[in-house]
Image (cartoon, coloured by chain):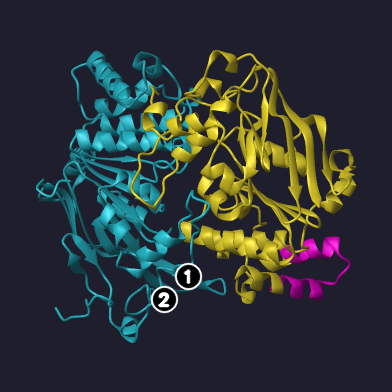
Chain colours: A cyan, B yellow
Amino acid sequence: MNENGSKVIETINLKKEFSVKVKNKGKIRETRVLKAIDGINLHVYEGETLGLVGESGCGKTTTAKVLLGLYPPSSGKIMLEGDDISHLNRSQMKSFRKQAQMVFQDPYESLNPRFKIKHTLMEPLEIHGIGKNKKERYEMAKKILGEAGLRPAEQFMERFPHEMSGGQRQRVAIARALVLEPTFLIADEPVSMLDVSIRAGILKLLRSMIAERKLAGIVISHDISLIRYISDRTAVMYLGKIVEQANTEALIKKRYHPYSEALLEAAPNPDPEVKFSLEKIKGEAPNAVDIPSGCRFHPRCPKCMEICKEVEPKEIEIEEGHMVMCHLYGGAGNE
Amino acid sequence: MTLLDVQKLSIEYRLSDGKLRAVDQVSLKLESGDVLGLVGESGCGKSTLVKGIINLLPSNGRIIEGDIVFEDVVLNKLSKESMRKKRWKEISLITQSAMNSLNPVYRVGDQIAEVIIEHEKVGKRSAMEKAEELFDLVGLDRGRLQDYPHQFSGGMKQRAIIAMSLALNPKLIIADEPTTALDVIVQSQILERMNNLLKGYSGSMILVTHDVSVVAQTCTKVAVMYGGKIVEYGDVVQVLKKPNHPYTMGLKNAFPSLIGEKRELVSISGTPPDLSKEILGCRFAERCPFVIERCKGMSLEKTEVENGYFYCIRHAEKEELRKRADLPETWESEV
């Protein structure tokens, strides 16, 4: 763990809102605000992986896109190694893109089918003017491909994506993300399209790359059991807010927020004698346009109290490094 | 009572450059009330097998030997028309992309009613009443019957499809990856609901999935498929707790769990065999850590165990192999 390391990326009260047109009887009646991210505070230390877990539509992917500068934030700040990067101009953005890279969900769609692997890996180097000449860029690309576990690298360099399996393609995607030596890497559901038998290998590769290169990594998934194998710390997201955040193993042993509890209990388990349970959660997540009053989880929460319906809980530190946002543990207090 | 008896079924696809035997001499028995999990990696033939059972193979695929007996009727000898009458009414299929199999320009309610009207001599009104009951069963609001598919979330569409597949209380439901695209909580909700509904009228189900956890949580029996063959079959607790085939041992290791201490995830290196070539002996031999000379080239040896069977030439040493399979070193090798 890297408690003493420096924070590579940090968000301060980050918000992202979209305006959506609400249709009623076929006509646009009103424009409303969809709060995709509603004030989140996150940080990732050097060499550390943060897992971001939650249901679909909770804002995980929007968070990734805002952090990578693909959407401008509505308010709040993003700090990269101490510099505010919330609003960058074009040339600043170009050098930022070199530092922040992403691995996408679907390796069948994220690689250019007409590019040989060497072109896929050498193109970013060329764009950012790294390496003196083609030969040097080729060597750099080959080296990273080998490190991503595709050996002999010379052979894989000459292949097209369709000549490779899903796992191999995802390794190429990881190599492409790392060839620019970024400081910050986001992987959005990196193994959900892959076969179970090869998932472990990809997760291990990501994890070791992040640790060895001292990157700040964020891995997004809806499956908390996968997050357990890759992240040092985990943040649980619900409707645009981080409701609980802690060291991953600590969170699995003791979860405070009823939503984290429900998420863990509902996950199917490979042991046929331990069944999942749905007692701790009702229904589906509401639409982010109509966020419930008070605590946004209260309509689905089995432990809902009167106060939960009216007052939004504040984030409190319940144990060292374990943040939770729930009235069960206080958190109603004034500023 | 035996509901479905698949006898030595082989299915071949005709390709531009030869043939591919996707299912090779598979035998399978299903009693009424059984929920069978069919697990395996992509390309192992699990979808082809179920498509063969329900007689919906693509035009280049055909059954080259074996029979499918469903309640004393040989399905593969039925005419197109009599098979069509059986679908939905006696056997229904929930496909992999079920969410996209609703017709976008018809109301969801009308689509469900259509199935009922087509197979039972009832009017529109009583069909709609039945559809309302079905929506209650799967936990959808009756009012939503008037909605179009695009107004539904992914989980709701999936429930609507399940409602449709249950419309005529079929004796057998074949569900091909019914929840793969869904979130953990929605997935568990749907699986629980389907299980309860089936129990209500002792219907049977074949659940096709690559997710061992889903099988562990929902099924009573499991068949593990590899390279077009069922390599191990038995009661779910027996197979997952004490696997006999090295492939099942490997699959189990590759699965993340939230219970107990964190254990290292281990992937099975290599890729599944190319089925367009003839393979002698055990199909898993190439990737098996316990491979010996005899595995290749010899015909397969079936070992019967209580309520099941498996194919492994080293069956006598299964206790020993199981112990070794638990160690991550056993599976380690280059990509």
From the top left corner, tell me how far across and down residue B334 is, in percent.
38, 22
What is the number of the mark on residue A302?
Answer: 2
Residue contact between numbered discs 2 and 1, judged by CB atoms under 8 Å: yes
**Label 2 element class:** loop
Q: Nearer the viewer, residue B148 or A200?
A: A200
Location of residue B161 by image quarter: bottom right
Q: Which mark identifies residue A279?
A: 1
Assign the C terminus of chain A to one quadrant of the image. bottom left
Residue B159, can we see it? yes
The answer to whether residue A192 is left or right of residue A61 is right
- Magenta segment, which residues? B112-132
- For the point 24% across and 58% down, the residue is A246
Tags 2 and 1 both on a single chain: yes
The residue positioned farthest toward the bottom in the image shown: A306
Q: Is residue A72 visible?
A: no
x and y percentages locating residue B61 in the rendered image: 75, 31
Task: Relative to B108, say whether B94 is above or below.
Answer: above
Ranked by sequence position, the earlier of labels 2 and 1 is 1
